Image (spheres, grey):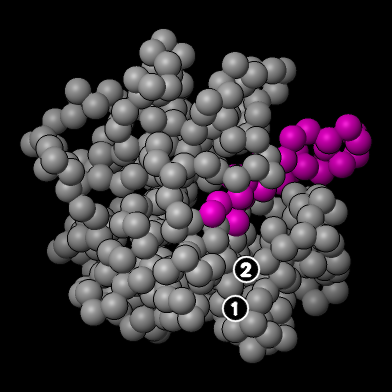
């Protein structure tokens, strides 16, 4: 999971994967939910909350534990004794669910999220935007097929547009541009390749501190090579793919960079030049983060040692750094990877054991996890 804490104090949670005993403080696995809950504030009704929950795509390893730990359903059905995290606004893409459901069976948490997103859309349709408050808000990320989102203009963000608000409020501490999921292609061969790739919400965040554009964060779920090729073709003459922090797509998978199999071909597997270009828009001192287990040359992809080498070459060219969450600060004792963002950029903070990545802006002197 990735938590962004804006200078305004608003929070954006991207994905979650609470595995096995990861919510048990007595288990050796880092207690990620306790760490997350410590970061969050309570509202006037004493509910822990996130301002936004973004699900990049409905694979189980991006939404596991959602129903157990976050409140899904109308605000009036919230049960205080359960003490679940309240979601003020959801960012959801019908396209990623449509493409996922055509190729795989959705897990229970993915189905629950989809049901909640549909409930919120219906609430908007029945009541109008002015009547939509915390716990009922939703933004649709990208147009659906066959005109199904044509009448959702007030809650629809089209591809390449800026996301206008955070939980219904204009926030000067962030600019976020929606880059994916991409619509169908007219070219049959290209569309077939796209269908084999994971479709995900892709966003470039520009995080601001004191009115200054302090950090560009690019995240793209499990988007693979065909998608990055198309993004490069569309945006090669813009700075929309530029980043100071990049979360490697698909957990440092080789298939975000190549159509060929690293397992079969190894060093002879060919990198897609266009996909590599799209993921190479690193600014000076950039950090590339692989959210995955320790990367071993003998392991199956993902993560892939070949992809790690490609990303290391990208950041080496800009005096940057490659980091893996499963190896930080060590393989035997991985810890929370937290970046403090000031007007001078992003700084990695040393931290105690946990696994989520936290991006906090304007946070100085707050312990253990600054709110900004």
The tag on residue 243 is: 2
Magenta range? 175-204
Above/below status of 181 relative to 260: above
The answer to if 177 sits in the magenta stretch is yes
Say which element carries label 1.
Answer: strand
Left or right: 106, with 229 as reference point:
left
Q: Look at 78% across and 33% down and name the residue there.
A: 184
**Residue at the extreme front of the image, as rendered:** 211
Residue 23 locus on image (x, y percent):
23, 55
Q: Secondary structure at mark 2?
A: strand
Which residue is at the front of the view, 299 or 333?
333
Residue 169 picture location, percent across and down: 40, 41
Pointer 1 with pointer 2, Cβ within 8 A: yes
What residue sits 87% from the left and 42% below the top?
A: 190
Neighbourhood count class around disc 2 (C-alpha, 10 Å): few under 14, some 14–19, many 20 upward: many
Q: For residue 90, what is the image quadrant?
A: top left
Question: Residue at point 72% right, 70% down?
Answer: 281
Q: Which quadrant holds residue 245?
A: bottom right
Of the pair 213 and 23, the residue shown nearer to us = 213
Residue at label 1?
Answer: 286
Disc 1: CA contacts within 10 A as few (<14), some (14-19) or many (>=20): many
Q: Is residue 242 visible?
A: yes
Rendered view: 86 above or below 119: below
Residue 5 is one of the magenta-drawn residues: no
Residue projecting furthest to the top:
126
Q: Residue at x 72, y 18 (%)?
A: 146
């Amino acid at each position: 999971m990735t938590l962004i804490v804006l200078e305004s104090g608003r929070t954006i949670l991207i994905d979650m994967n609470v595995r096995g005993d990861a919510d048990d403080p007595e288990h050796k696995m880092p207690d990620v939910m306790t760490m997350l809950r410590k970061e969050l504030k309570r509202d006037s009704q004493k509910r822990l909350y996130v301002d936004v929950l973004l699900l990049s795509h409905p694979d189980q390893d991006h939404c596991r534990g959602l129903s157990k730990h976050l409140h899904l359903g109308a605000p009036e059905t919230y049960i205080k004794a359960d003490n679940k995290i309240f979601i003020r606004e959801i960012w959801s893409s019908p396209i990623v669910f449509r493409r996922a459901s055509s190729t795989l069976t959705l897990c229970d948490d993915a189905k629950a999220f989809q049901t909640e997103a549909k409930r919120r859309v219906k609430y908007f349709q029945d009541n109008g935007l002015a009547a939509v408050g915390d716990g009922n808000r939703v933004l649709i990320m990208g147009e659906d097929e066959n005109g199904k989102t044509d009448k959702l203009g007030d809650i629809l963000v089209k591809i390449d547009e800026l996301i206008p608000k955070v939980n219904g409020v204009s926030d000067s501490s962030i600019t976020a541009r929606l880059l994916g999921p991409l619509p169908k292609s007219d070219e049959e061969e290209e569309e077939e390749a796209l269908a084999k790739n994971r479709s995900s919400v892709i966003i470039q965040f520009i995080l601001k501190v004191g009115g200054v554009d302090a950090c560009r964060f690019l995240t793209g779920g499990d988007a693979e090579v065909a998608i990055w090729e198309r993004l490069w073709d569309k945006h090669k003459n813009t700075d929309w793919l530029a980043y100071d922090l990049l979360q490697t797509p698909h957990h440092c998978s080789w298939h975000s960079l190549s159509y060929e199999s690293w397992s079969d071909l190894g060093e002879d597997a060919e990198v897609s030049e266009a996909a590599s270009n799209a993921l190479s828009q690193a600014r000076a001192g950039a950090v590339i983060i692989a959210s995955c287990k320790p990367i071993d040359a003998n392991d199956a992809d993902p993560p892939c040692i070949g992809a790690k080498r490609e990303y290391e070459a990208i950041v080496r060219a800009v005096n940057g750094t490659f980091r893996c969450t499963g190896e930080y600060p060590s393989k035997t004792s991985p810890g929370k990877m937290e970046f403090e963002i000031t007007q001078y950029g992003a700084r990695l903070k040393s931290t105690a054991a946990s696994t989520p990545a936290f991006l906090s802006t304007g946070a100085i002197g707050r312990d253990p996890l600054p709110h900004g």
